[in-house]
Image (cartoon, helix red, strand yellow):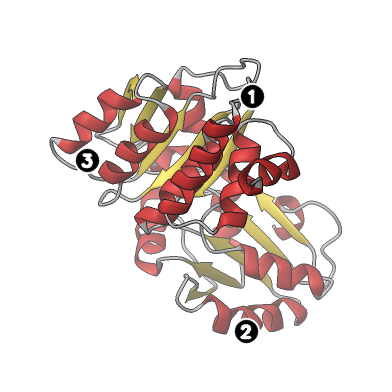
Amino acid sequence: MKERILVGDMSSQGRLVLLGAPLGNPADASARLRDVLGVADVVAAEDTRRLSRLARDLDVTVAGRIVSYFEGNEERRTPELVEALAAGHLVALVTDGGMPSVSDPGYRLVRAALDAGIPVTAAPGPSAVTTALALSGLPSDRFCFEGFLPRSPGARRSRLRALAAEERTLVLFEAPHRVTAALADLAAAFGADRPAALCRELTKTYEEVLRRPLGELARWAAEGAPRGEITLVVGGAPATPATRPDDDALRAAVAEREAAGLTRRDAITEVATAFGLRRREVYAVVHQS
């Protein structure tokens, strides 16, 4: 069975398999995910209760040992799983939904397995990133994924200012209790008219995709914080030739960022990036007598 499921010669060598789990609808599970769950020696799950529910929905019996593997214990548990892999066991890693390592536990184990010379493969499956991107109606030929924005308001706003000139479509995750503030900051940094989509509860019963400018989304969220898993997709900045501001405007832009909490060095770097200038050029303007 294992030889049929995995690529390459298994022999007695252990192998780590990353399982792409359904975002919500169990019918999206692949045949390989079902097979691997049924034969893996160890299944490391972000939430063991969700794994048990998924196995029931798929009518799969998980015969191997089930262990929890989440943000709070992955540092401690990774060496244990590498030991199992080194002993020749087939270890499967599954998160609550989507691909492991994509803003979910997994990177630490993948890196440790590779460093130990252990093969790593995947049973690809659903991804909230590409699903939301495809549903957004925004350009998808070039995009960048930012994961979760910083939690603190100051760090979040600083990061968004740095991204404001990004011309590629932007995909990011946000927690329900922070999405209202995040949308307000996005509208302030990118402009209220920037097109965007809020994708909520993808593939689930109450799936919802709101395609509106950032300003409208921010007002909508302010009326009542949306619930559930949320992915935001934001259109890229218009590709317009950068116009060099005059010296007074450059000094004001640096001062504004310093007032927001950045060091002068970081403020100068951010302004230079925003206007397509060399850092030393902005530095000279700020420090000229």
Q: Position of residue 99 (x, y in %)?
A: 56, 50
Q: How far apart are labels 2 and 1 at the CA level?
A: 56 Å
Q: Quadrant of residue 250?
A: top right
Q: Quadrant of the N terminus?
A: bottom right
Q: Residue at 59% of width from left, 44% of height from top?
A: 270
Under circle 1, the secondary element is loop
Q: Would you place residue 91 above or below residue 246 in this image? A: below
Q: Are marks 1 and 3 in contact (CB under 8 Å)?
A: no
Task: Mark 1: give few (<14), some (14-19) or many (20+) Cα within 10 Å.
Answer: few
Q: Earlier in the sequence, mark 3 or mark 2?
A: 2
Q: Quadrant of residue 150?
A: bottom left
Q: How far apart are labels 1 and 3 at the CA level?
A: 40 Å
Q: Residue at 44% of width from left, 55% of height from top?
A: 155
Q: Quadrant of residue 121?
A: bottom right
Residue beneath disc 1? 244
Residue in front for this viewpoint, 206 or 225: 225
Residue beneath disc 2? 80
Q: How far apart are labels 3 and 2 at the CA level?
A: 39 Å
